Amino acid sequence: MSDNYILEIYGVSKIYGAVAALKDVTVKVPQGQWVAIMGPSGSGKTTLMNIIGCLDTPSEGRVILDGLNLGDLSHAGLTAIRRESIGLIFQEFHLISYLTALENVMVAQYYHSMVDESEALAALARVGLRERAKHFPKQLSGGEQQRVCIARALINHPKLILADEPTGNLDEANERLVMDILRQLRAQGSTIIVVTHAQEVANQAERVIVLEHGRLAQDRLNGPPVELGVSLVPGQGLNETLFSEEPRAESSFSRKTG
Amino acid sequence: MICKMALGALGRQKRKNRLIILTVALGVSLAAALLGVMFDVGDKVNQELKSYGANLNVVPRGASMLSEMYLLEPDSEETATSEQIEKPADNFIAEDELFKIKMIFWAYNIVDFAPYLTVPAKISDKKILLTGTWFNKRLSLPTGDVVDTGMTNLKAWWKLTGPSGDDQDLTGVLVGRRLASELDLKPGASFQVQVGDKAKDLTVRAVFDSGGPDDERVFAPLALAQELSGHQGLVERVEVSALTTPENDLSRRAALNPGSLSRVEWDTWYCTAYISSIAYQLEEILPSVRVKAIRQVAESEGAILGKIQLMMILLTIMTLICSALAISNLVTAGIMERSVEIGLLKALGASNLSVIFLFLLELFLVALVGGVLGYVVGFGLAQVIGLTVFGSTVDIKTAVIPLTGLMVLAVTLMGSLPALRALLSLRPTEVLHGR
Ligand SMILES: Nc1ncnc2c1ncn2[C@@H]1O[C@H](COP(=O)(O)OP(=O)(O)O)[C@@H](O)[C@H]1O
Ligand SMILES: [Mg+2]
């Protein structure tokens, strides 16, 4: 039934000299799941995200992304997967300082296929920044910059969204805004993996994976008590529950589904 | 999009970009100046050549190449034999026809001419060549014009220790520097010359330094050589110095075969002072002669020219390598500063090739500014070189412009090689999650 899994990780280890950043990690993520990865600093969360995001290769083990064994791919092949299938959200946003918000989104379009300004504007509208399209990063607050980063991650309709501590540099209000957007994405069926230190953020996810010293320490499901087998392949019901239970964060943008 | 990104990036790192512009401009200006001078130096040297010396050689139609060669070999056995002296008459030009040289269409472009008649002779058993010529002959033309011409003007650069020859002084001769030192002949000294069984007592008017093979010879009034050789009223060869227009396609085609020109082309050619049209007109007016442009001089100058040009090319290349080295540090530092941005592009799925393309595009835009600046400065520099070395401005050939473009490209590529390595090896994971 591997068809239902967007991501399968089997016995992955990553060794840096004497340090084993990851040790024998096995995880399977079904299509459309929202997973939170937690763990103390240095436990290998970023290393795991890099491997999933095709930015790095494991020392051992297999990673299968959307049915493709990453170990079989060349450098260029991995680059293509990043371009086609993955949306990256960074703790430090990494916007290009001399490009406007709109242009920052369009950069991702440019390397993916073709620039399309109206589509890029729509993506900014989705994160509530339609009016700030012509602003440069330094004219935007941290939360706004992170939303531009999210718009950039979304623009090419990735199968998998990877966010490494997306709210680590944000205050609570902005954290809520960002989580709101992620929730919407989840509602639209995106698969999201988010690394976080914040329990509130982890609580939004359906599943929490905890790493310790590079090993999988915990793998549990959140939310209302659901049977294990059912929740791993989530249905609409779970989403609706999540949305209705969570207090709505104030946001300047209208919720859109599509 | 990529242009937007490249231009946006240029706005930052202003100081570095200014330095790159400056470095490229410096290198390119030097290189462009050198190239400009290099291309023009050939024309310049030709202009210099034109200002003195003969550029046309008039020989009898029947004269064999062989005898011309013997004349250049004063020590060879055959030169002293009497066969050489008894040349058939069609190996000579009549002295009394020479005034016609000043009556061609381009007569006023004929600056000077001098006839020669060489006689193999002996001075106390040493085989030498004695050449008779006009030193400074006054000719009255049928048109009523009076013309002074002769070797004294034609060889104006010769250094003489005394007075030049006199066409009336039939025993006064000029002796070449090397011959004079070999035979220990000083100005004023007397010596005896023998041709066959004739002997003649002569006096050294002056010793000359021609800077060439003529230094082995004796130059005497034409009448003396004619008397010694028995070729009264005849000469073997005439050197003509004419002011000419630089050669071009038309003149080269005409030189090969005047018959190949169209009517209009032919008129244009005939009425232009090309060396080939002057030669043609001389052959028209003196039907028994063959006129050749003198190439020996031009060729040896050409060899030197080639060496100078080679040196300039080497200097140009070295200049470019230096500026490439100078910018490579700046460029690499610029990449390091922007490693996060480059890592991001790679993380977004930009291939190595497209990142390199973006980077080179940026650098090339900066370098282009430097190149244009350098070209302008180089143009000025070339004029300074032209004025100090040749006393005239340098015409920058249009070929220098695309070459300058190529140089900018070369400097940019060479200068960015180390940076390209850094670009390729940059891993997004190392820059994106600030550890
Ligand atoms: N490139 C690297 N070279 C050496 N050690 C590394 C490298 N990347 C990560 N590590 C080590 O691997 C461990 C896990 O790092 P990381 O995945 O960044 O942890 P986390 O993101 O959970 O804080 C740490 O001990 C870290 O020092
Ligand atoms: Mg981390």
Image (tube, grey):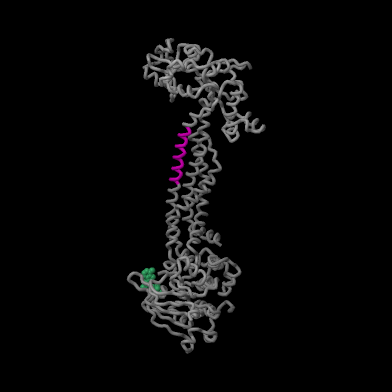
Q: Where residue B108 sits: x, y (%)?
A: 60, 23
In the picture, which quadrant includes the N terminus of chain B? bottom right
Placement of the C terminus of chain B among the 4 image quadrants: bottom left
Camera-side residue: B152 or B252?
A: B252
Q: Where does the image place residue A207, in percent across and percent down from the top left?
A: 46, 82
Q: Position of residue B152 (x, y in %)?
A: 50, 19
In the rendered image, residue B115 lying in the magenta stretch gets the answer no
Residue A135 at least partly seen: no
Query: Would you say residue A142 is visible in this rendering?
Result: yes
In the displayed orientation, state which residue is furthest to the right: B263
> Residue A108 at x, y = what percent?
53, 67
Which contiguous range is marked in magenta? B301-319
**Residue B183 in the figure: left or right of residue A85:** left
Q: In front: B347, or A166?
A: B347
Q: For residue B310: magenta?
A: yes
Vertical side of A197 occupied by A121: above or below:
above
- Observer-nearest residue: B430 or B289? B289
* Rendered view: B143 above or below B52: above
B265 lies left or right of B29:
right
Foreground pick, B297 / B334? B297
What's the residue at 36%, 17% (across, down)? B184
Which secondary structure class fits the magenta region best?
Answer: helix
Q: Quadrant of ligand 1?
A: bottom left
